[in-house]
């Protein structure tokens, strides 16, 4: 009985589980738990079906108290296939997505009721979700069940890499996570007026389509200089970086050179920005607000010790100072431009340029100031002040040395830069014009005033040719053509010399060359004899054999062999070192040749002629060998 | 089975490529001539900035021309940029040492620059004899002189090789004279090539802070002014080490220096 009850119990549990398993999950979730009024957030409800179960009649929940910014007309479909245990399981996932916002003036949490859908004739209801009233910029939080990477949304509404594994509810993403902004200062403690460079970096682990700055950092208490962006064409340039075991793509968002204007702890407020991906239609989705931590920079007052009198607090950096005039001599009534230039490293805009002292007998006009800054780390630049001064009387005047006192933060000491004095010479009488230009040839005009036509030294005019004369040689010397010009002639000359010598050597009448020529000639004769043999011209064949043998013999003997009878030939050959058997073969061949010319007989047969040809070739080699 | 290209096809292809190359070179020359004319026209209507831009466009093409450097110098003077003007006139005079106009305008530009500031180099030594000898002729003249003597020398040797006995002494003497000339011209040319490795330069801005190292953060060693002629002895990135006539050295930004 007990066994029967146990079996029935098991059956009920299995049946209940089976029934539960057959109810398709239909779950709603928010991308964040809290949002400020007007701040968009995402509500998504997902139906998971096993196989191709039919569904219809989806009904969105009542979004009372909420603004619907966008809504899905059709569900977003995705399918997963699981294989194992000898079976294949197909799962279809359908999601309806709504972008919502709390209405202005919302005062408390808003609960979104159930969405409904009919599956296989049954109506399913989703869970209700609640969105709380929170601060603007709150970062999305994963839906329940996403944490730990498990639950009904295995992938989550948002890729976990984008928003971090454990995003906090206050949603400040400056701490290491999957996407955050980090502000870095190169020197957290600087002197007043010294440069501190702050750089804001964006860290992401997955490509984002859009980046939208929302709030720029405030730099109260600093003189700020924006540093040029290193990003090409306004696009963020990312580099790979591994931090905390995670690979990030990092881009520089902005950089500023900050010069504290006062002592104390000065704050650079947070930079805020939004990153998002784009959907099929290019609309931003999965937007996420990121916020960097604020920074504190401590500005230390400049030391009192060693401070020169007249030091200006803005003169912090490494500067040089110089004075120049546009002329050394001037006539009364003409003006001289005195330029005082301060250049160097530091906050050049704020540098106090030494003033030109009042010069006795000179009138000065309002100075003109120009500043050229090269932003960088460090910031460098030039500040120029131009004074126009005009003399009232003739004589010599000296512009005294000007002193620029500055504090060098690197050396931690005060520095004084002194310019050289400049002497100016004033000539002419007060009110008298010094030059009258354009009065012709300068000759005194009859009856009129004397015109002093001063023609100054000018430069000679330009050359107005149709095309500029080109100095090809200057370029030619560095080209391959010049190398070829240098290398080819000696090589060609060497080739000519060597070629000539080779030709002479080949043409020389030495024993070896004679033998080589004779051998070549003999081969030609043998080829001719072969031709006669092929055509059956027996007499001609043997004439050729006789001739070639006698030519070779003549060469060997050093005298014509044609006039010698066989006995004389034998004697001569023996005297030339030929062995008796070889002499006998030569004599036999000549004799056979003679006979065959006049009484061919059996020697006219092709076989005999071939044998005679072979014998002649061998004898040529023997006779033609070294004596 | 693919057929091997016939010789005629190859010849036609090569001829076509040569024609295309020639057409490209001609088009490039036309563009440069057009920019040159544009520069002249701008100068004559007193638009010196436009003239400088047009001349610089021609110069960027890499052509070497004393005329171009001369006109560029004139435009710089009119524009008030004396450092670049001195550089351009120095360049024109280096390309053609016999160019009187360039020498005259160079002197004028130096006079104008001296009204603003003058650099007096204490203990400045005269340039060595070999530099004066090498720069006494233009690079182009030296090159063509050497090429002519060198080719003439080998032509005389070749002729002598094939000549009859009675003509040989005269040809030997001719080859010796040409060879000696080629040797002398070759020495001058070798000096020129060596000089190009340690080129001269001219400071371009009105005032330049010459640093002790190749970075703006180094201490300023001394200050120099527009038009100062220096030797460029080293290069480190965008910085050049310069040497004055008295041996003093320092670093300036490459953009502040016009190479000769």
Image (spheres, coloured by chain):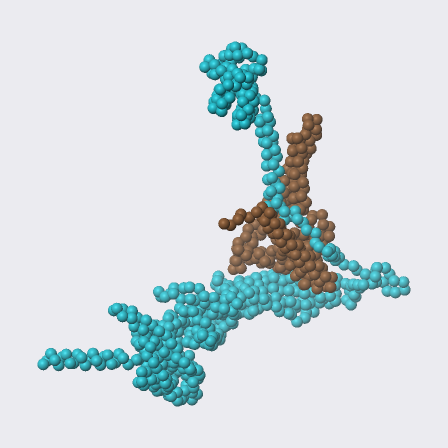
Chain colours: A cyan, B brown
Pick the front one: A194 or A27: A27
On screen, residue A441 versus residue A151, left or right, reads: right
Q: What residue lies at 44% left-to-right and 87% top-to-bottom?
A: A104
Seen as rendered, the residue at the extreme left is A1
Q: What residue lies at 64% left-to-right and 36% top-to-bottom?
A: B154
Seen as rendered, the residue at the extreme front is A601
Q: What residue lies at 58% left-to-right and 46% top-to-bottom?
A: B7
Pick the front one: B156 or A436: B156
Q: Residue A69, position in %: x, y?
A: 44, 83
Pick the front one: A496 or A618: A618
Residue B14 shows in this picture: no
Q: Residue B104, position in %: x, y?
A: 72, 53
- The quadrant in which residue B40 appears is bottom right
Seen as rendered, the residue at the extreme right is A447
Q: Is residue A379 above or below residue A490?
A: below
Number of numbered discs overlaid on the protein picture: 0
Q: Residue A370, position in %: x, y?
A: 61, 68
Q: What residue lies at 66% left-to-right and 48% top-to-bottom?
A: A472
């Amino acid at each position: 009985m007990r066994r029967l009850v146990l079996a029935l119990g098991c059956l009920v549990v299995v049946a209940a589980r089976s029934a539960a398993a057959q109810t398709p999950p239909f779950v709603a979730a928010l991308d964040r738990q809290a949002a400020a009024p007007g701040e968009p957030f995402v509500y998504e409800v997902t139906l998971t079906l096993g196989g191709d179960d039919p569904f219809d009649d989806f009904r969105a929940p009542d979004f009372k108290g909420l603004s619907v910014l966008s809504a899905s007309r059709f569900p977003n479909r995705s399918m997963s296939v699981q294989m194992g245990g000898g079976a294949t399981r197909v799962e279809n996932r359908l999601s309806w997505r709504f972008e919502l916002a709390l209405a202005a003036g919302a005062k408390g949490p808003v609960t979104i009721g159930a969405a409904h859908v009919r599956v296989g004739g049954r109506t399913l209801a989703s869970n209700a979700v609640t969105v709380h009233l929170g601060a603007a910029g709150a970062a999305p939080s994963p839906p329940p069940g996403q944490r730990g990477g498990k639950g009904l949304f295995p992938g989550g509404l948002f890729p976990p890499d984008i928003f971090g594994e454990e995003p906090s509810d206050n949603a400040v993403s400056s701490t290491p996570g999957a996407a955050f902004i980090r502000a870095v200062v190169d020197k957290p403690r600087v002197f007043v007026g010294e440069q501190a460079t702050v750089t804001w970096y964006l860290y992401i682990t997955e490509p984002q389509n859009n980046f939208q700055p929302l709030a720029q950092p405030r730099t109260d208490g600093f003189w700020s200089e924006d540093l040029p962006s290193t990003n090409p064409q306004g696009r963020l340039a990312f580099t790979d970086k591994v931090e905390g075991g995670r690979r990030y793509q990092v881009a520089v968002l902005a950089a500023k050179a900050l010069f504290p204007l006062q002592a104390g702890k000065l704050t650079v407020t947070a930079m805020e920005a939004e990153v998002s991906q784009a959907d099929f239609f290019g609309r931003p989705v999965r937007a996420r607000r990121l916020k960097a931590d604020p920074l504190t920079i401590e500005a230390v007052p400049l030391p009192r010790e060693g401070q020169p009198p007249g030091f200006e607090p803005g003169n912090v950096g490494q500067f040089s100072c110089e004075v120049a005039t546009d002329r050394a001599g001037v006539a009364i009534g003409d003006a001289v431009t005195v330029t005082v230039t301060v250049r160097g490293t530091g906050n050049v805009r704020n540098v106090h340029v030494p003033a030109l002292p009042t010069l006795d007998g000179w009138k000065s006009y309002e100075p003109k100031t120009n500043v050229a800054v090269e932003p960088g780390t460090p910031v460098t630049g030039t500040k120029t002040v131009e004074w126009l001064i005009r003399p009232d009387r003739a004589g010599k005047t000296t512009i005294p040395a000007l002193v620029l006192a500055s504090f060098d933060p690197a050396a931690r000491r005060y520095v004084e830069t002194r310019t050289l004095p400049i002497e100016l010479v004033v000539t002419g009488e007060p009110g008298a014009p010094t030059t009258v230009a354009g009065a012709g040839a300068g000759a005194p005009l009859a009856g009129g005033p004397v015109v002093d036509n001063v023609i100054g030294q000018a430069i000679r005019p330009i050359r107005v040719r149709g095309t500029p004369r080109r100095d090809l040689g200057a370029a030619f010397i560095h080209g391959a053509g010049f190398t070829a010009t240098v290398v080819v002639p000696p090589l060609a000359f060497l080739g000519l010399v060597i070629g000539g010598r080779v030709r002479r050597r080949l043409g020389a009448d030495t024993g070896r060359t004679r033998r080589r020529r004779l051998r070549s000639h003999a081969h030609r004769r043998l080829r001719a004899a072969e031709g006669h043999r092929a055509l059956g011209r027996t007499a001609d064949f043997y004439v050729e054999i006789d001739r070639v043998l006698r030519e070779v013999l003549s060469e060997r003997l050093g005298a014509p062999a044609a006039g010698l009878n066989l006995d004389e030939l034998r004697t001569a050959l023996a005297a030339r070192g030929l062995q008796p058997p070889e002499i006998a073969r030569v004599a036999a061949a000549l004799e056979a040749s003679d006979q065959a010319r006049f009484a061919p007989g059996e020697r006219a047969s092709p076989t005999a002629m071939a044998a005679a040809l072979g014998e002649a070739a061998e004898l040529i080699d023997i006779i033609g060998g070294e004596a | 089975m693919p057929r091997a290209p016939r010789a005629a096809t190859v010849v036609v292809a090569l001829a076509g490529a040569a024609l295309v190359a020639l057409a490209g070179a001609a088009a490039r020359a036309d563009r440069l001539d057009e920019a040159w004319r544009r520069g002249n026209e701008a100068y004559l209507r007193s638009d010196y900035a436009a003239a400088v831009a047009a001349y610089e466009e021609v110069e960027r093409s890499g052509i070497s021309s004393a005329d171009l450097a001369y006109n560029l110098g004139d435009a710089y003077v009119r524009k008030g940029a004396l450092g670049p003007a001195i550089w351009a006139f120095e360049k024109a005079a280096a390309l053609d040492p016999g160019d009187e106009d360039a020498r005259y305008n160079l002197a004028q530009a130096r006079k104008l620059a001296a009204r603003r500031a003058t650099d007096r180099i204490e203990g400045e030594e005269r340039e060595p004899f070999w530099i004066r000898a090498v720069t006494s002729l233009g690079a182009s003249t030296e090159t063509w002189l050497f090429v002519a003597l060198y080719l003439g020398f080998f032509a005389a040797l070749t002729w002598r090789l094939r000549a009859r006995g009675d003509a040989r002494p005269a040809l030997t003497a001719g080859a010796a004279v040409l060879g000696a000339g080629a040797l002398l011209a070759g020495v001058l040319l070798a000096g020129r090539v060596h000089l190009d490795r340690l080129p001269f330069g001219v400071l371009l801005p009105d005032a330049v802070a010459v640093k002790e190292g190749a970075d703006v953060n180094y201490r300023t060693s001394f200050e120099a002014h527009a038009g100062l002629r220096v030797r460029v002895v080293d290069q480190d990135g965008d910085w050049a080490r310069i040497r004055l006539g008295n041996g003093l050295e320092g670093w300036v930004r490459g953009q502040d220096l016009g190479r000769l």
